Amino acid sequence: MIDFLAYHIQEAGRMALDAQAKLTAGDISFKGERDLVTSADKAVEKYLVDAIISSYPEHGIIGEESGSHGADASYCWIIDPIDGTTSYVHQQPYFSVSIGLRKDNTMIAGGVYAPALNQLFLAEKGGGATLNGAPITVSSCEKMIHAILATGFACLRKRSGADNLAVLAKLLPKISDIRRCGSAAIDLAYVAAGKYDGYWEHNLNLYDIAAGALLVTEAGGTVTDLRGNQDYPASGIIATNGAIHDILLQGVIV
């Protein structure tokens, strides 16, 4: 099924990229106070849902825009049609299509495609992770002072009690630098590829991280929640190269 995933995630990405250049105000709306959605989000998800139903009618689907359909099926596809919609709307390249495939509550395949960056990340459980067909591994950074980290602020958008600003203020003096691209899927893929040494965020949804988390673990990294357990993303998420994981865990506790 990885070939099916790879083909359709690229088709979906091309749809999104073509639509980005043609976006008008009429294509953009808010599904929350700060949460944008576009006609392209909906069209891309419909394309993917239709493709899955046509080829695998017995499979379940969890989509950001269309919700859950048969989520308790043995096989379930988890879709974020455009992760990074704010960047997408503002004509920036940091958006992606994210697709994960779960079997009996275990992620077995995942892909993240950033079409504007021409970057296709794929992973199969037990088979490693790739970027544009070449194997990838996490970084070898062992010291926080040398680490490039990434984060996001879904907690602010959702007005939750999580205070990522306090975590950021605590960590910044102890690391090399910070990045924020606005797509959790890309952030996780970049940890997998060794472009970032670690990433953390609060208040994400399963479709934000399903594919990216598998990329990280298949590239040799570590993924946990903010307590060091496996309850992610419900209890937040931390993804690292493994070497700095325990230190970063301590850093996100305010």
Image (spheres, rainbow, N blue to C red):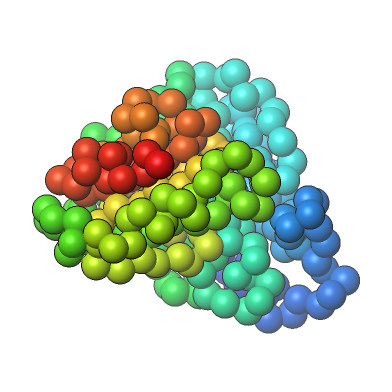
Q: Position of residue 124 (x, y in %)?
A: 32, 40
* Image position, residue 179 (x, y; %): 39, 67
Residue 247 or residue 150, whichever sits in front: 247
Where is 187 relative to 237, above or below? below
| Rendered image quadrant of residue 15 | bottom right
Residue 159 location in percent, x, y?
67, 46
Q: Nearer the viewer, residue 142 or 56?
A: 142
Image: 21 above or below 208: below
Residue in view at x 60 percent, y 18 percent: 72
Relative placement, left or right, of 168 versus 216 is right
In the displayed structure image, the side of residue 151 where residue 219 appears, left or right: left
Q: Report the side of 108 relative to 164 (left or right).
A: left
Residue positioned 67% across, 46% down in the render: 158
Residue drawn at (58%, 19%) of the image: 73
The answer to whether 100 appears left or right of 215 in the picture is right
- The total number of labels drawn is 0
Residue at (72% x, 55% y) in the render: 35
- Looking at the rendered image, the quarter that the C terminus falls into is top left
